[in-house]
Image (tube, helix red, strand yellow):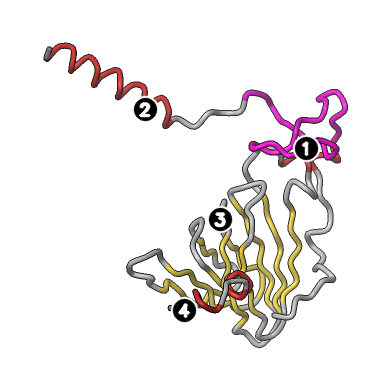
């Protein structure tokens, strides 16, 4: 009986550790086929014989977006929709330009950790830890500084300098998602807000 129990524990341990291993890519790349439907792992792969250099290229991250939000930021996102070669690679990036006093309001990326590199200016950045502490972790960063926002936590950035600020972001997902906290809360019925 003891031998059987030990054997079963060993098998269970090996099985569980096998499930915990991250599976590596099964091919060199999987350029997104924009005509296909979305699958859980991303878009279907384009025929490898039809892949070209432009599938792995995006030009223009050096230029601010021409879409200014009401909060004073311009966001240029480079994800699988703009750069099909990112499909299944688990990364994306963005450029954010902050006007004076511009703010990227509290939001969440449910599927990605975010790393921000400040190219120009000064930002007050921070995130809130999960329950029960709900602790604010924040500081002011300056040109050349890096700050990390863990996946799924509410975070923000605000320009506190006397000039525009520019940041480059890397995200640990080809499709990080975005939930703006204020917008999400506004959709809730009054009976459940702030009780």
Q: Residues within 10 Å of mark 3 (few under 14, many from 20)?
A: some
Q: Main secondary structure of the magenta part?
A: loop
Mark 2, residue position:
17
Q: Residue 157: give x, y in percent of width and height.
A: 58, 74
Disc 3 secondary structure class:
loop
Disc 1 secondary structure class:
loop
Along the polypeptide, which appears first: circle 2 or circle 4? 2
Along the polypeptide, which appears first: circle 1 or circle 3? 1
- Quadrant of the rendering where the C terminus is positioned: bottom left
Circle nearer the viewer, 1 or 3: 1
Mark 1, residue position:
37
Mark 4, residue position:
194
Span of residues in magenta = 26-52
Give the label on residue 110, or none.
Answer: 3
Q: Residue 113: give x, y in percent of width and height.
A: 54, 54
Residue at x 79% of width, y 75% of height:
68
Disc 4 secondary structure class:
loop
């Amino acid at each position: 009986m003891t031998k059987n129990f030990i054997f079963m524990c060993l098998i269970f341990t090996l099985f569980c550790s096998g499930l915990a291993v991250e599976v590596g890519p099964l091919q060199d790349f999987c350029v997104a086929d924009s005509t296909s439907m979305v699958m859980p792992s991303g878009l279907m792969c384009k025929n490898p014989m039809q892949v070209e250099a432009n599938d792995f290229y995006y030009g223009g991250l050096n230029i601010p977006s021409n879409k200014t939000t009401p909060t004073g930021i311009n966001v240029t996102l480079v994800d699988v929709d703009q750069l099909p070669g990112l499909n299944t690679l688990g990364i994306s990036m963005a450029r954010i330009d902050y006007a004076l006093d511009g703010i990227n309001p509290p939001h969440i990326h449910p599927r990605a950790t975010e790393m921000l590199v400040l190219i120009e200016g000064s930002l007050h950045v921070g995130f809130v830890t999960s329950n029960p502490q709900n602790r604010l972790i924040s500081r002011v960063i300056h040109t050349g500084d890096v700050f990390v926002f863990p996946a799924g936590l509410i975070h923000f950035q605000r320009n506190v300098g006397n000039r525009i600020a520019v940041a480059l972001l890397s995200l640990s997902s080809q499709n990080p998602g975005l939930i703006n906290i204020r917008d999400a809360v506004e959709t809730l019925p009054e009976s459940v807000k702030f009780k």
